[in-house]
Image: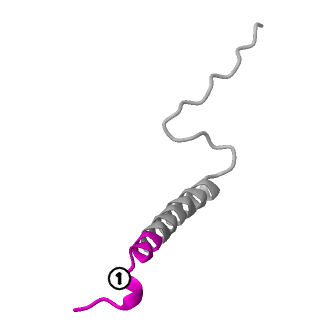
Amino acid sequence: MALPPWLQNEGAWIAIGVSLVFVIAAVVMHRVVVNVLKDPAGAPPSGTTPLEEPRSHE
């Protein structure tokens, strides 16, 4: 099976690889942004403990 002439160039494969990296980065960034926006406002990040409430000196 012979490759088309435009795929026989080394630069074409570099361009395809760089494009693929950008697409993967975009998918990962999209997932992160969606997860951040789905979290309720003001909720502490998971895995952290809330700060203790200040004690009154009565």
Q: Which residues are magenta?
A: 1-15
Placement of 39 over or under 44, stated as above or below = below
**Residue at image location 55% in from the left, 59% down from the top:** 29
Residue 37 in the magenta stretch? The answer is no
Residue shown at the point (54%, 65%) measured from the top left: 26
Q: Along the line of sight, which residue is nearer the eye, 51 or 22?
A: 22
Q: Residue at x 39, y 79 (%)?
A: 9
Looking at the rendered structure, the kind of residue marked 1 is Gln
Q: Position of residue 53 (x, y in %)?
A: 68, 22
Q: Quadrant of the N terminus?
A: bottom left
Colour scheme employed for the rendering of this structure: one colour
- 48 versus 54 height, above or below: below
Give whichever of 48, 6 is nearer the camera: 6
- Looking at the image, residue 46 lies above or below residue 15: above
Q: Which residue is mark 1?
A: 8
Judging depth in this view, the residue of 44 and 13 nearest the camera is 13
Return the x and y of residue 55 as percentages of the image width and height: 70, 14
Q: Is residue 53 above or below residue 24?
A: above
